[in-house]
Structure formats: C-alpha cells, structure tokens
Image (cartoon, helix red, strand yellow):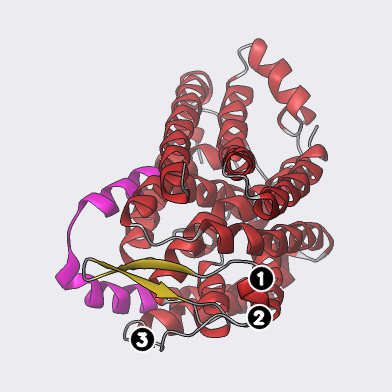
Amino acid sequence: MDDRRLETIIGNLLRVGVLLAAAVVFSGGALYLARHHADRVDFHQFSAGSAATHSFHGVIASTTHLNSQGLIQLGLLLLIATPVARVALAVVGFALEKDRLYAIVSLIVLAILAFSLMHAI
Amino acid sequence: MSALLFTALVLSLSAVAGFIGSLTGLGGGVIIVPALALALGVNIKYAIGASLVSVIATSSGAAAAYVREGFSNIRIGMLLEIATTLGAIAGAILAAHVSTHAIAIVFGLALLQAAYQSLFTTGPEVGALVASDALATKLRLGGDYPVDGKRQAYGVRNVPGGFSLMFGAGALSGLLGIGSGALKVIAMDRIMKIPFKVSTTTSNFMIGVTAAASAGVYLTRGYIDPRVAMPVMLGVLAGAFFGTKVLVQARVRTLRIVFGVVVLALAIEIIVNGITGKV
C-alpha cells in the first residue's frame, strides 16, 4: 500500500459518498416541493429556526417521521461526513504503512473535526 | 416568492456558479453567496451556510480526479489541515459574533482579491524547485510529481510560515463559508515553495476537510437551512460536473475576464450594501 493507491481508494469512496448524499438531498427536495411548492418563502431575516434541523438527533428524529426538511438535512450530514471519513481512512492508511508520524498527524485532524461536530450532537 | 420559484431560481444560479467555478478553478462559493444575498435577498448567514455545503460537495466529488493526475501531496495536506481546521472553527465562531454587515464587507474584500486574481494572473509563476529545509526534511514533506511523463522531485521550505497562513485561510473559510482555495495556494506555492500544480490540487483536497470543521458550528447555529442548501448543493454539483466534462480550454482566458468583471461588480455592490446596512 503506497500513498497513491491509498489516495485512489479514498478518492473513489468520497465520490460514492457525495453521490449518495446528493441522492438523499434530491429525494428530500422532491418531497419538500411536492408538499410545500406553494408556500411563501422569505429568507431575508435570519432566525435560529427549528431544532429539528440543527442537531444530529433532531435530524434523525424528523427523518423517521418522513419530514422533507429533515431528509434534506440528513443528506447534508452525509455530505459533511465525507471529508471526515477521508481523514479517518488516512489514519488507517498511514497506520498500515507503519508511518507513525502521519498517523498521529491525521489523528489530530480527526480529533479537531470530532470536537467541532460534537457541538452539533 | 413561492417555494417552487425560489428553488428553481437558486438551482439555476448555483448551476451557473458551479460551472464557472470549476472552469476557472476559483470555486463556486465566491459567486453563490453574493448572488443569493443581492439577487434574492437571502440573509447572508443562510447564504454562507449553503455555500459551505457546496464547497464540501465539490471538494469531495473532485478528489478522485485529482489523485489520478498524481499531483496532490497527502502529507503536506494533512499536516496543514491541523492549521486550517483550527482556523475554520475560530472563523465559524467569529461569524456568530459579528454583524451580517461586517461579514458582507469582509466578503467584499475577499471578492476583490478573487477579481484581481482572475483578471491579472496570467498563469502560474514557474518558481524554481528548491531543496527541503531542516524541518520539512524531518517531516518528510518533499515528494515528486509528473513533468513530461517523468517524476520530478521537489522540496518544501518554511513550514511555520505556511502553517500560520493556513490558519488564516481556515478562519476566512469558516467566517465566509467559502473554500478560500486562493489563500491556501499562496501559502503553499509562494511561502512554502511547493510547485504550483501540487499546491492547487493539494488545496482542493484540503478545502473539504477545512469546511467540515466549520460545518458543525454552522449547523448548530442554524446557518444551514435545508430549503436554501438543497438547491445550492444540487445546482453547484451539477454545474461543476458539466464544467469538468466540457472542454473549453481555448476560451478559459475570456471566461476568466468575464468572471473577474462579474466578481468585481459583486464585490463593489456587496461592500456598498454592507456599509449602508442593506445586506
């Protein structure tokens, strides 16, 4: 396993992740438009909005109720997960290459990402 | 405006932004935010939330293609991501504490830089290849990349300088919901003396990870509204996909000029609107 091969595998996995996320977002969007196409929308004023779309728990809960916005948000969470998966796979890859320095470097990046996403849980 | 019309308009705008962004290499985020804010009256916080999502989509979606070209350096990228992700969290937190007007003005300044780059950069300056300094050697950052079918080795300098600027690039990304690829390239290409091609592709790989670091903060603060982010993400992805399929090499120079003028106009308008408090 060298860097190039590792990168190719990761790159292809990421593409699958993005396509999957796009498919979920598209489904949620279609459902949203089917139900709410005539709703008046105005995004001029910012309001913190509903908790349903602002946390992992809220998103999962609203998706199980087939809430269209919850479904879109689930797709977006999948998308946000793709770079995180990329870093996690790099940790494994460097460990397999017995490259301890860069396994630790990748682990630090993963910890920072986890810290940031923890806020959303 | 009805939800259907809004979705259709945002989808079209985003597709154009993604298409032009991928052709010019400047990314879609810098156009999508002012376009949403100025043309559709979307609050800039929703606009940057949606843009951040599209930045992750294009970066992750293009990763495989960049690896195939064999230019990106995963060690350099991963090491510098420590700086960009920390910067991104700082920027995202800062975004919650400054006014939308201030964000608009800073965004305008970032647009001015993008316009300048688009209009006046005639191509990569071919810097001389260097040997790695002591720290870069210790960190094994040097690599090789294909030049005319052969592998050309290169070295890396000034890791602390590049690392510091990367923190700034991350902060800008977190504050404005853009990839800030231009600043990342400057850190690698100018400061660390890494070959231009390696810098641009490694920057693309870093953009998604950087954006993911601020995404958590954006999500909790409610910047990512599914009704705005949905058409932006799908539109930018579709646009970027066609951008990579269409070969318009000959017209890229013209396109960059058009893009530069558009971005310049957006920069002036968003700064004026930010100062007068309309955005």
In this rendering, position of residue B102 left or right of residue B264: right
Q: Is residue B72 above or below residue B2?
A: below
Tell me whether marks 3 and 2 sit on the same chain: yes
Q: Which residue is mark 3?
A: B126
User: What chain is tagged by disc 1?
Assistant: B
User: Is B244 part of what is drawn in magenta?
Assistant: yes
Q: Decide which of tag 3 and tag 2 comes sooner along the chain.
A: 3
Q: Which residue is mark 2?
A: B134
> How far is mark 2 from mark 1, CA to CA?
6 Å
> How far is mark 1 from mark 3, CA to CA?
26 Å
Q: Residue at x 75, y 51 (%)?
A: A108
Q: In this view, which residue lies farthest toward the front?
A: A98
Dominant SS in magenta: helix
User: What chain is tagged by disc 2?
Assistant: B
In this rendering, position of residue B5 left or right of residue A118: left
Q: Is residue B45 above or below residue B60?
A: below
